[in-house]
Amino acid sequence: MNKLSNLLLSDIPKYEVILPSSGDRKSFRPFLVKEEKILLLAQQSGEDSSMIRAIKNIIESCVDGVEDAGSLPLFDVEYIFLQIRAKSVGEGIEPTIVCPVTEENIQVKILIPDIEIIKDKNHTNEIKISKEIILKMRYPSLNDLDNRDGVINYEDPSSFYDLISDCIVSIQTTSGIVDASTLPREEILEFVDNMTKTQFEKLLDFFLTAPKIEHKVLYTASDDVEREVLLSGLSDFFG
């Protein structure tokens, strides 16, 4: 790297972000022109996989101490990226929504600092599915999303059945704790397959109540009726 570039890099400001999943503090810098180019190309491609790789690259480049952004929980990735974007481009974003009544495209204005992480006070990653079995779960990561072509539909259990199995960290029984990573994947899938509907729904609830970034926006369509829309996830905020 030449001396001029070093001068520029030495003058880049640093900020702090708190990871929602762990409470750990990380310092970060705004993204540079070269990183913004990667992001713009990914947006222009319209491919989810390109966008995921771009976000992963930006977080790993801009956040100190994050070497594998792909392993972070999705809500961590979304929150971190929003903070980087706010310091790089500005706090205002203008996503386009579609009114479900008039079916018209409407651009709304949002300030990134107003976007919050929503946490359910009763949420836990330890799921007791029977008197003798407790499952410890992990949150879906950016890699999980990439492996599923950028789509995880939490309203359709059959579409992410394998994701549930992948997110089991350990199985605690009266005999001890079994590390799920030491078991064949087929055994985990069969284990989930043999759950009762009630037990399976307890696992679904873990995903449905997991922390998420959300923001409610009021808008008025061409029929002069004020309505509210709930935005959730990066695809909504940058759609």
Image (cartoon, grey):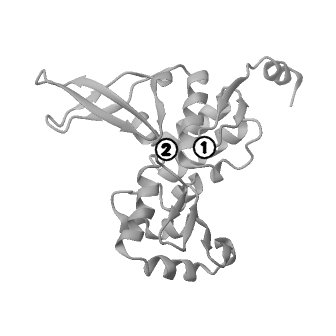
Instruction: Indicate the position of residue 198 as horizontal and vertical percent values.
Output: 36, 69
Task: Confirm or deny contact between disc 1 and disc 2 (CB under 8 A).
Answer: yes
Give the Cα separation between the discs numbered 1 and 2. Answer: 8 Å
Q: Position of residue 51 (x, y in %)?
A: 53, 45
Disc nearer the start of the sequence (1/2): 1
Residue type of the residue flagged with mark 2: Pro
38 sits left or right of 145 in the view: right
- The one of 155 and 177 positioned closer to us in this rendering: 177
Q: Which residue is mark 2?
A: 211
Q: In the structure shown, which secondary structural element does the residue marked by tag 2 occupy?
A: loop
Which residue in the structure is indicated by mark 1?
Answer: 21
Q: Position of residue 159 (x, y in %)?
A: 39, 66
In the rendered structure, the answer to whether residue 28 lies left or right of residue 11 reads: left
Q: Quadrant of the C terminus?
A: top left
Based on the displayed image, in which of its 4 quarters is residue 37 positioned? top right
Residue 211 placement (x, y as % from top left): 49, 44
| Image mark for residue 149 | none
Image quadrant for the N terminus?
A: top right
